Amino acid sequence: MSRSLFINPTAFETDLQAAFAACAKANGVQTAAFERFAKQGIPNRRVEGWKWSDFHGALRGLSPANDAEAQADIAPSDFAALNPLEFRIIDGRIELPQGELPDGMRYDVVDPVATIPELEHHAIATLNVAMTRKALGIEIGEDAPDRPILIRHINTNAASTFTQTMMRVSVNARARLIETYEGEGIGLYSHLFHMVVRDGAKFDRTVVHETGAGQVVNTVCAAKVDADASFKQTSLSMGSRLARHETLVHLWAPGGSAEIYSLALLRAERHSDFTTHVVHKAPHCRTRQIHKGVARDRGRNVFQGKFEVEREAQQTDAKMTANALLLSNTAEANHKPELEIYADDVECAHGSTCGALDEDALFYLRQRGLNEAAARALLVEAFVGEVIDGIDDDRLGDIFRASVADWLVCE
């Protein structure tokens, strides 16, 4: 692979090809994936789904090489009080929990996924398939303990890191997963999460992204939800140089449900992009989606949500809401809610709003003794409360509220 596979390659793409060629244990599937990526190239503003998230520009000046040493000292997680089963992925290196495997669970470092058909035209997911050498595999059985799983993605260097997680939630099982994205690294962090929620199972995923301002993050979660199974996801992003969290959910069988809640809190020039695509492939499925974005300074909030209802998916019930609150004249919000419906017996709706704090509400609170900062904080907390109130675990909800309070203090 000495000649360039790219047309008019950027410096990052040239270095990326050299890094791939230098990687050990690249197989034929990964070589084919890299060649597919090279034909697509790094997404830029001319690509419809990336017009508000300039991934191409964000990578300018970064290096794909990954030869830095991992940081030795890792502080305890904010979620340690929940007594989770903790996994760490530090600069791409997977660390498993010590001790015996809990009953009803299996996990190990495994070979990565070869391909995900629905994502073969997704440039960064394809690049991840090409570059990831080992993945974290987890299987949850019906008799597994009701204990949260914590996966900490920690990026400390200036290199690019590619990781994967594969999870299977067995029939009638229940799994609670917390994923955090941490670290002051300034490289690209790409994570591909592929999972299956089997018949009657319940899966609850919480995502918290609080990295340094200079990091570029792209996560893709592809979930298959079977009959009478449920997928619930609650995400909080503080943004970064560019942070894009993507979720692709396929409701494959009758009775499946998806709940997707996201919250972006942005300051300075941080960028957050929540992009989702829920495909209803069977009848009697239900989806609820709520997004809240708050931005100040030059923060940029992006939301792209799409519900696709196939012809066989009669009696689908799907509703989507996206609301943005701008706290300065230079902050920005871009929303794109979409419905693509081929069935004729459905209840589907979407809505989007964008605005500033209500001056009358501010005046009302000031008249009752609150100073301006306290009044503004109270209104922001009320605005985001719909997302946080949907969290089933009170302790988890308290951690989210603390993050909101900390962000407001910096206003």
Image: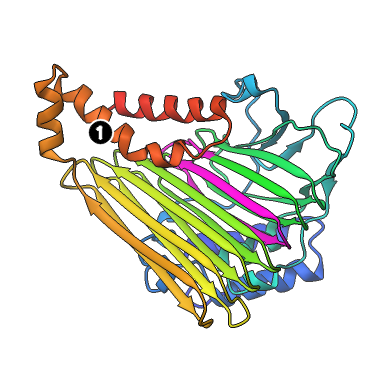
Residue plotted at (50% across, 74% down): 346
Q: How many marks?
A: 1
Image height check: is 106 above or below 75? below
Identify residue type, mark 1.
Leu
Image height check: is 80 above or below 316? above
Residue plotted at (73% across, 62% down): 226
- Secondary structure, mark 1, is helix
- In magenta, the rendered stretch is 208-237
Image height check: is 332 above or below 124? above
> Which quarter of the figure is the C terminus placed in?
top left
The residue indicated by pointer 1 is 379
- 15 vs 210, nearest the viewer: 210
Q: Position of residue 374 (x, y in %)?
A: 22, 22
Does the magenta run of residues contain 372? Answer: no
Please indicate whether residue 367 sits to the left or right of residue 381 in the image.
left
> Which quarter of the figure is the N terminus placed in?
bottom right
Residue plotted at (66% across, 59% down): 223
Does the magenta run of residues contain 222? Answer: yes
Dominant secondary structure of the magenta stretch? strand
Residue 410 visible in the picture: yes
